[in-house]
Image: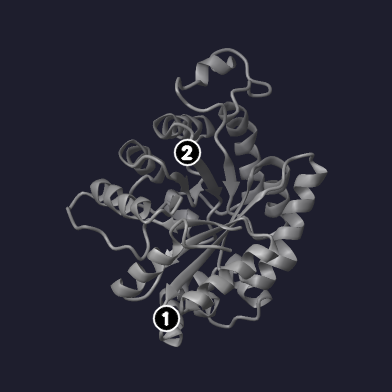
């Protein structure tokens, strides 16, 4: 069984109220009404994903909400912990924090070089994870050393954390210290032969539960799959040049990023998603693609009770 989530920022359109938060709340309502159990929101350079999902959590009950992903380097871990715990309190336990380290050429917008990203993430987790788990930060003294100093009344006992991980070192870190990974532009070979074996072995060696493997995929129920693939190759062209995504596409033998799309009629889409489940993926993070009619058709298929994998 694979758990379905939808990217709230891609493919659903926006109501056009002129207020981004109001619009994303309405998008989340549409996802919830379709009986899709999870809504994901990436972090861009404008809105704050954790803040938006805090608002969505208050307005749209019942669905899980998660970031996919928040870049850690520009945020102090105590600040991010406070944001995540506040979101968890608003969501009454339905919030998941997805984290990443961005890419060379993109992180610099925050005035920080892309330097030793894994080391930066490890140091961030050293402070962040204990606070999210309600524990003392190792080595902390004075103000903030007591877990009660960082507690947010109403937040669940812990906030699940996932890492945007594709490389071996990041996957091992995700398995050793967090609840799993979120991928993007990773096809069947990358998931089955690389991501799942590495992260599961790391979690097992660390004595942790089996990790969550959230596979980010563009999906369209359509009668013209080649058109969707061509459109996505254009839309994702910039992403495909980033080293980590290019390596994943090359591992899968996919020269164009659109080739990763899950497309076809309802039966074909279900079969392709089922194949990811068989490889060890626990979740599909779906970015709806195609025309408005195709996106609506896809969303209907993905709803709980209609997706039997």
Image coordinates of residue 254 in percent, x first then y, are 60, 80
Q: Quadrant of the N terminus?
A: bottom right
Q: Earlier in the sequence, mark 2 or mark 1?
A: 2
Would you say 240 lies left or right of 43 here?
A: right
Residue 47 shows in this picture? yes
Image coordinates of residue 48 in percent, x first then y, are 37, 44
Picture residue at 51% right of the left edge, 67% below the top: 217
Q: Which residue is under mark 1?
A: 228
Q: Quadrant of the C terminus?
A: bottom right
Query: Residue 132's quadrant in the figure?
Result: top right
Would you say 129 lies left or right of 268 here?
A: right
- The local secondary structure at tag 1 comes to helix
Residue furthest to the top: 142
Which callout, 2 or 1, points to the residue nearer the camera? 2
Residue 298: assigned label: none
Picture residue at 48% right of the left edge, 77% below the top: 263
Q: Nearer the viewer, residue 27 or 139?
A: 27
Image coordinates of residue 161 in percent, x first then y, are 58, 41
Residue 94: assigned label: 2
Image coordinates of residue 277 in percent, x first then y, are 64, 63
Picture residue at 68% right of the left edge, 65% below the top: 278
């Amino acid at each position: 069984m694979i758990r379905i989530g939808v990217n709230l920022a891609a493919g659903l359109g926006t109501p056009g109220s002129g207020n981004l938060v109001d619009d994303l709340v309405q998008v989340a309502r549409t996802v919830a009404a379709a009986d899709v159990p999870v809504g994901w929101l990436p972090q861009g350079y404008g809105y704050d994903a954790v803040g938006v999902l805090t608002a969505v959590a208050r307005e749209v009950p019942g669905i899980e909400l998660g970031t996919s992903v928040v870049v850690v380097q520009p945020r102090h871990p105590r600040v991010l912990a406070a944001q995540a715990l506040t979101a968890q309190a608003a969501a009454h336990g339905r919030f998941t924090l997805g984290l990443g380290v961005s890419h060379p050429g993109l992180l610099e917008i925050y005035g920080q070089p892309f330097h030793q990203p894994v080391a930066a993430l490890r140091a961030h987790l050293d402070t962040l994870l204990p606070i999210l788990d309600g524990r003392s930060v190792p080595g902390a003294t004075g103000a903030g050393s007591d877990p009660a100093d960082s507690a947010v009344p109403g937040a669940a006992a812990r906030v699940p954390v996932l890492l945007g991980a594709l490389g071996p070192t990041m996957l091992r870190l995700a398995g050793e210290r967090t609840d799993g990974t979120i991928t993007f532009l990773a096809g069947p070979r990358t998931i089955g032969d690389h991501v799942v074996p590495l992260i599961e072995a790391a979690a097992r060696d660390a004595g942790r539960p089996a990790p969550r493997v959230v596979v980010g995929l563009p999906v369209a129920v359509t009668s013209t799959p080649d058109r969707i693939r061509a459109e996505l190759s254009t839309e994702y062209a910039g992403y495909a040049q980033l080293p980590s995504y290019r390596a994943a596409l090359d591992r899968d033998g996919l020269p164009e990023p659109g080739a990763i799309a899950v497309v076809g009629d309802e039966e074909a889409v279900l079969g392709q998603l089922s194949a990811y489940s068989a490889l060890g993926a626990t979740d599909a993070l779906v970015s709806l693609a195609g025309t408005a009619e195709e996106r609506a058709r896809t969303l209907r298929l993905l709803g709980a009770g209609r997706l039997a994998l």
